[in-house]
Amino acid sequence: MKELIKIELKENKLILSWNDNTNSKVNLKKLRDECPCVNCKGESVIFDSYIPIKSPFKPAGFYEIKSIEPVGNYAIQIIWKDGHNTGIYSYDILKKISD
Ligand SMILES: [Zn+2]
């Protein structure tokens, strides 16, 4: 079974070490843009439908991680510096968005 044994934050990347001796590198911008929570997914749908140009303005700390909490042994919860904390990233999602 896949387990996450180590998480490191390096510059603008999250480096995940798995128990099968592989690593996944995930860009923080991509990590936030792919936030799987209902709020983010819902908002992106609304923006795409009703606002022609997505605002390039993001609040301070939008792409910066404050802390990371394990969720069972299948996911991690990421708390961002702008206060957003509802994104639960399953190992599958992390694998999918890694470089
Ligand atoms: Zn979110």
Image: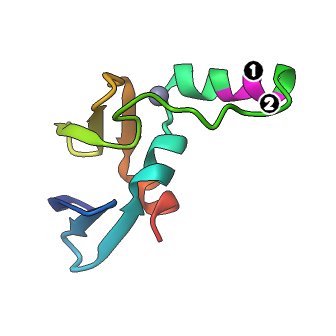
16 lies above or below 37: below
Mark 1 is on which residue type? Ile
Residue, x 84% and y 19% (percent of image)? Answer: 50
Label 2: element kind: helix
* Residue neighbourhood size for the residue with mark 2, other residues' Cα within 10 Å, grouped as few (<14), some (14–19), many (≥20): few
Task: Please name the residue shown 57% across and 32% down the image.
Answer: 57
Residue 3 placement (x, y as % from top left): 21, 59
Question: Which amino acid, mark 2?
Answer: Asp
Q: Which quarter of the figure has residue 66? A: top left
What is the CA distance from the residue labelled 1 to the residue labelled 2?
A: 5 Å
Q: Does residue 34 appear anywhere in the picture?
A: no
* Picture quadrant where residue 60 is located: top left
Name which residue lies at 72% across and 33% down.
54
| Residue bearing mark 1 | 46
Magenta segment's dominant SS is helix
Residue ID at (74%, 25%) = 47
Residue 48, disc:
2
Q: Nearer the viewer, residue 91 or 43?
A: 43
Q: Are marks 1 and 2 in contact (CB under 8 Å)?
A: yes
Give the magenta part as a residue range: 44-48
Q: Quadrant of residue 25?
A: bottom left
Q: Residues within 10 Å of mark 1 (few under 14, many from 20)?
A: few
79 lies above or below 86? below
Query: Does the magenta segment cover residue 34?
Result: no
Residue 94 lies, in percent from the top left, at 41, 55
